[in-house]
Structure formats: C-alpha cells, structure tokens
C-alpha cells in the first residue's frame, strides 16, 4: 500500500497530478466510453466558447458542474458522449484580425480580399486550444478534445443552412430594417445580449431644441430634449403623449413662446432661470396656478391629442423629399414625463420607437423609403452635406453651434447616464437602422412559453422569472450580419429580385450550380451563381452578402455537432430534447435563449430537458474579471500552488480570489429522471463559506 504523506509535506497539486497520470495511463475516460457504448444515451450539450481567449474561473465553475453530472450519469450505466466545442466565427475573431492588420473599415477588407482576410481569421481560431485543454484537464474534467466540434467545419455549417431553410419553409424568416445597437468600432450591429455586456456611466450633452410651428400666429415653438445631437439632422417628426396636458408659456424677457408638457415645465424653467440671472426664479414653482409668473407668463393649456398633426419648420434642409409627409406631430404612449419636455424628436433611422411611430404614421414605409444618413463606419453620408464623412460623435459640438446660429437652441447642459459600449472595441454604440434577415420570434412566443414549462431548471426561479420574462417580451431576432468570417446566408437572388432560392445542403448547391463545393465560407462560394429557372434571358442568381450571427450558429449546436439530418438520424430523434446543459446565468439571454428559439421553431420542443444555471464569478472587488484590469490571478497559477480541489479556506483569503471548484455535495436523480443538484443553495453556501467574493444574491441565489 502506498504511504500517505501527511502534514506540511503533503501537496494537493502533486497528489492531483499523480491521479491525472494514473487516469491517463489506464485511459480511464476512453475505457469508460467504450464500456458504456451500447448502453442508453444520456445526451449532454457543451456550449462552445471562443478559443481566442483563455478560460477563466467562470468556465471552470460551469465545467465542474458539467463534469459532476456527466460522471454520475455514466456511473448510473448511461453512455455519455462529452465532446468539447469551439465557437469559431463572429466579432471576437474579426476584431483580433482588425487589430493585427490595422483594418479600420469594411473597404479595407475588400481591398485586401475576403479570401486573405478569412484565412487570417481561420489562422487564429485555435490560438489557445492547447491552453484550454491543459487547464480543463488539470481541473480533472473528463471531456473529449480530440473529437471536438467546430462551428467553422463544413458539416456544422451545412446543418446551419438546413435549419435556416426549415425556418424559411415555415414562414418564419423575413427581411427588413431594424434599428439596432450598432458598433462603429466593429462595424456591425450587436444583439441585445451583447449590448448589455458593457454599460458605462458617461456625460453627454443635453439639449433643449425649439421647433417653430408653421403658421402659428404667436410664433410659438415646440421644445424637445435630446442627448444625441448628431441625430437631429435626420429628424422627421415630433412625438407627444396624447394623454398628457401641455402648456404654452411666454418668456417676458425674450418674447419667445414655448410648448412643453405641464409636468416638465418647472424643470425647464429652472434650467432657463439658472442660465439667465435676470429671470425671477423664486416663483417658478407657481407657474401651474397663475397666469403671470415673474419672467414667464402662462398663456394656454391643452391636451396632447390636440397637438397631433401640427406641422413645424425642419431644423435642417437635408430631407426635402419628405416635406409633404414629415415634419409633423405624432402621438404615442412611449413618450414619458420622467425626463425631457414630454416632446420627443423622432429620427426613424436611429431610434427603435422613432422608426415604429413613423411607419405607423406613414412617414416612411416598412422595408423601404428609409434613408440612413450614417454609414457603416459611423460617419455621415453625403446626404448630410455639411458634415459628410465625419464621425457622428465628433460632430455634436458643430451641430450645437449651428443650432445656436439658427436661434433654435433653448438650453444646453450635460447629463450623466448609463450608456452601452461595444464589448469588444469599447467604443460607444449608436442606434442605427440596418437591413437584416429576421426570425419572426414574436409569431412563436406562445410556443416558446409552453416549451419553457417543459424544462427543469436549477435554480427554478431563473426559469420561472428571469427566463420566462425574457421569452414573454421576446422580439423578432435579427440573425444576419454584414461581416466576412461566418457561415454565409444560403440565399441566392436574381438581379431583379423576383427569384429567390434557399439552399439547404451542399449537394443542392452543387446540383443547381454545377460546381463542386468543399468549403462554405464566403471566399469559397460568393462567386458561385445559379442559373435562373425562368430561362437564360433572366441571367443568374447571386448570393446575398450577409453571414449568420454566431449566436444563431451556437443555437443550432444540438443538430449541427452530429451533422443531423445528414447523419445520426436515429441517435438524434431517439434522444431529443437533450438531457442536460449547464452554463452561467448570463446565458439566459444568450445560448439558452437561442437553443430554445430554434428548437421550438423546428420541432415545437425545447432543446434540453434539464438545466443548471450557475452564478457569475466575479473578482474580489465585485467587478467582472478582466485581463486588462488584472484583477484576478491565472487559474493555472492558483492550481499549481493550491491544487484544483483542496478544501482549506485560508489560502483563498490570503489569495484574495475565488475558489476554482465548489463542493457539490451530491447528485440526486429526481422524479421521471429530472436532474437535481442537492439543493443549489448548498452550493452557494459552500461558495460563501470558502471565501468566495462578489457572488451577489441575484447572481447565485
């Protein structure tokens, strides 16, 4: 029997390394898979991370939970295939290449060639694969790296085409404009999930701007408030709330007459009085009850509905073609009175509600007629001739000065607010209308809610509250990106737009085009054309430029990683939905959501039966772990010093960081095979008693 070393001479890291060596010598994981090969399947989906970054403690926490459950099910006699996966496409890879090659715009990519650019992207996809394998293996997890799946493999990409074609056949795909958070740094729209990753408190200009009413005998003006001066050149309407009371007041000093919501008047007058020492500010709060109030006189009160249809003079002359239908007052309940003036300036190309109300009012037409006067780099187009080619955020001061010159600037100040920044380029996002292909999620919202009820979550309240609420408020999903490194949309369209073909397989593309296809990336298929089915005189069909959002790709994982329906039909159909997934709570709006949407749309079923949702692992200071901030030590450094599973809490307090692996007391199989980690709150308690920092109640409860 081997002597057990005790006391100060005992080393957890060395003991763990001996165990790992023993497992490797007897090929323990491989042997387990072979011995259970003909047993019933227990299907586990492992969400694909990007290999362009190193694993952090959140990955290790989720990986440990996955390992506990899959080991337990293997010991119960199930065959549990555990394939590691890699998310290979999308912004993270392109952004690294853009930095490496100094690429500033999409034109730079086109100049160097999509083929060279994409091959550069391919070359860095597996940058940290070895580091991932070393760290994951060192923590004791059994997972198959040699038989991994990659979203850039042709078989995986082919299934994405099949999924998309199925959604098209079901009438769940359409093309249109959508105002989306847009990264000028990465030159692409971002999903709602990505938008929420990087909010910052910033100072922005806060403008009160006057819009002169046409034909008004009092020369009165509507006053709107905005923190985005760069959107004012694209103004096409003003919006009020029909249920609010509005007032007309006169400045006795200047003679100017303004219209604002009654509930917002005091704040505006306070700002004007502070800016004008000659005004009598100590009586402003009485303006609602008197006709004469110091420097301001109350002239009239009226309902918001009475303002609807009033025409006003445009601030600028950039859009004369809209003069007949635009530059008028609309009404909608999205206008609130918690800030501003109760009057909202509408630039439909740069605001989601602006776009919606202008469509409803007939100022613009859905899917056409919208002019987006800001290009993909965030610069004004020639339509805004005074500022052509300039980055929108750099033009704010010039627009403000121009408004002063025109006599339209009522007041200027600053406001501090939380604003989204791109999680990759760290540049401020803008909201911009972009053409995109959409999955009509709102059509299947009721089905999504039903499918969610068929799943079992730990902890349950995340399913019943957080995830349920997200599904209940789901919007149509923009799944295309105007990028280069990704799975291309399999849509071929004729030059006149009449004919469209959606390709669902490599074989179909080869049959219709007569060209052999070995790779599905853009530089291998963009040149492929399909002869028109109407005859030679109608020319050929060409592929649209867009690629899929990488979240769509990962949402197709349950089918794509086994190349269903081209292979493994029986395996898939006998074991779907999958038995188990586990990731961090942030995936309720990410991978968990895309899995649910696609599986519901395809099969009317959830993608998984059981789910464990872990909390977010934060640094000691309560902030997100960041390589740039260096607010956490390397996982391998900690493992080499203390081991992956040792239980003493003293080392964690001296390290000032998080434990790598938490103590999951037991795994229990509940009713009808529903899986439960023995009281998830025990897991949380274990984390807290071991000195885990930054685990808030919302994140880990």
Image (cartoon, grey):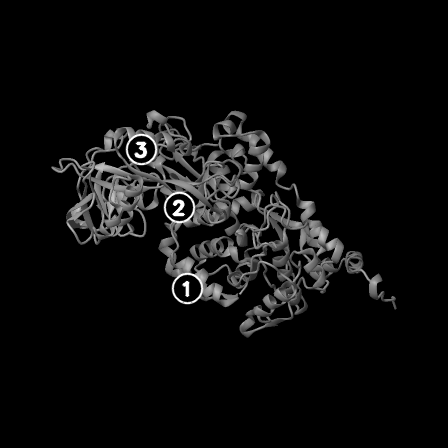
Q: Nearer the viewer, mark 2 or mark 3?
A: 3
Query: Along the line of sight, which residue is nearer the eye, 402 or 567?
Result: 402
Q: Residue at x 63, y 54 (%)?
A: 57
**Which residue is tagged 1?**
450
Of helix, strand and loop, which one carries label 3? helix
**Which residue is tagged 3?**
233
Q: Position of residue 398 (x, y in %)?
A: 36, 29
Q: Badge 1 local density, few (<14 within 10 Å), some, or many (20+)? A: some
Q: Position of residue 224 (x, y in %)?
A: 27, 42
Of helix, strand and loop, which one carries label 1? helix
Q: Position of residue 609 (x, y in %)?
A: 52, 64
Query: Along the line of sight, which residue is nearer the eye, 557 or 278?
Result: 278
**Marks 2 and 3, Cα distance to the nearest angstrom?**
29 Å
**Marks 2 and 1, Cα distance to the nearest angstrom?**
22 Å
Q: Residue 337 got which mark?
A: none
**Which residue is tagged 2?**
438
| Residue 347 seen | no
């Amino acid at each position: 029997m081997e002597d057990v070393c005790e006391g100060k001479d005992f080393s957890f890291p060395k003991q763990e390394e001996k165990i790992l060596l023993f497992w490797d010598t007897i090929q323990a994981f491989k042997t387990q898979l072979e011995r259970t090969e003909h047993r019933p399947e227990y299907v586990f989906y492992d969400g694909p991370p990007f290999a362009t970054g190193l694993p952090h403690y959140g990955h290790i926490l989720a990986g440990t939970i996955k390992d506990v459950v899959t080991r337990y099910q293997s010991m119960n006699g199930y065959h549990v295939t555990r394939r590691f996966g890699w998310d290979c496409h999308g912004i993270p890879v392109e952004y690294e290449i853009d930095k490496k090659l100094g690429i500033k715009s999409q034109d730079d990519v086109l100049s160097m060639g999509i083929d060279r650019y994409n091959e550069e992207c391919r070359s860095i996809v597996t940058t940290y694969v070895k580091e991932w394998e070393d760290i994951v293996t060192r923590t004791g997890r059994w997972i198959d790296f040699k038989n991994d799946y990659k979203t850039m493999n042709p078989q995986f990409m082919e299934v994405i085409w099949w999924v998309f074609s199925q959604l098209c056949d079901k009438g769940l795909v359409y093309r249109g404009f959508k105002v989306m958070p847009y990264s000028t740094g990465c030159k692409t729209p971002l999903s709602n999930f990505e938008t929420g990753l990087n909010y910052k408190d910033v100072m922005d200009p806060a403008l009160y701007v006057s819009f002169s009413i046409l034909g008004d005998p009092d020369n009165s003006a509507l006053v709107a408030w905005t923190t985005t001066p760069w959107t004012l050149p694209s103004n096409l309407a003003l919006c009020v709330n029909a249920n609010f009371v509005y007032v007309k007041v006169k400045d006795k000093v200047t003679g100017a007459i303004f219209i604002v919501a009654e509930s917002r008047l005091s704040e505006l007058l306070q700002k004007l009085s502070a800016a004008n020492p000659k005004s009598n500010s100590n009586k402003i709060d009485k303006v609602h009850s008197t006709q004469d109030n110091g420097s301001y006189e109350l002239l009239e009160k009226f309902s918001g509905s009475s303002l609807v249809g009033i025409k006003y003079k445009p601030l600028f002359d950039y859009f004369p073609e809209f003069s007949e239908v635009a530059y008028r007052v609309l009404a909608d309940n999205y206008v609130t009175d918690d800030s501003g003036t109760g009057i909202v300036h509408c630039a439909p190309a740069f605001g989601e509600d602006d776009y919606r109300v202008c469509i409803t009012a007939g100022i613009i037409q859905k899917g056409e007629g919208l002019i987006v006067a800001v290009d993909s780099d965030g610069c004004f187009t020639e339509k805004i001739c005074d500022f052509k080619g300039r980055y929108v955020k750099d033009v704010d001061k010039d627009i403000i000065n121009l408004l002063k010159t025109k006599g339209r600037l009522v007041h200027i100040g600053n406001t501090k607010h939380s604003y989204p920044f791109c999680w990759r380029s760290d540049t401020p996002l803008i909201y911009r209308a972009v053409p995109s292909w959409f999955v009509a999620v709102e059509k299947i919202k009721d089905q999504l809610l039903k499918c969610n009820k068929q799943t079992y979550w730990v902890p349950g309240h995340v399913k019943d509250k957080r995830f349920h609420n997200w599904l209940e408020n789901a919007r149509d999903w923009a799944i295309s990106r105007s990028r280069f490194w990704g799975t291309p949309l399999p849509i071929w369209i004729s030059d006149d737009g009449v004919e469209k073909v959606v390709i669902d397989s490599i074989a179909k593309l080869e049959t219709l085009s007569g060209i052999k296809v070995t790779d599905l990336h853009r530089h291998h298929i963009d040149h492929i054309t399909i002869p028109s089915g109407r005859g030679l005189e109608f020319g050929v069909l060409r592929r649209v430029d867009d690629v899929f959002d990488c979240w769509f790709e990962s949402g197709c994982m349950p089918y794509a990683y086994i190349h269903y329906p081209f292979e493994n039909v029986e395996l898939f159909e006998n074991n779907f939905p999958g038995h188990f997934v586990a990731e961090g709570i942030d995936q309720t709006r990410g991978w968990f959501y895309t899995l649910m949407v696609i599986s519901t749309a395809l099969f009317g079923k959830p993608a998984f039966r059981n789910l464990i949702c872990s909390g977010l692992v934060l640094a000691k200071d309560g902030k997100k772990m960041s390589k740039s901030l260096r607010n956490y030590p390397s996982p391998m450094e900690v493992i080499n010093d203390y081991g992956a599973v040792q239980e003493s809490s003293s080392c964690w307090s001296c390290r000032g960081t998080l434990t790598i692996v938490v103590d999951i007391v037991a795994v229990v199989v509940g009713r009808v095979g529903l899986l439960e980690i023995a009281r998830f709150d025990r897991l949380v308690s274990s984390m807290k008693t071991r000195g885990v920092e930054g685990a808030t109640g919302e994140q880990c409860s």
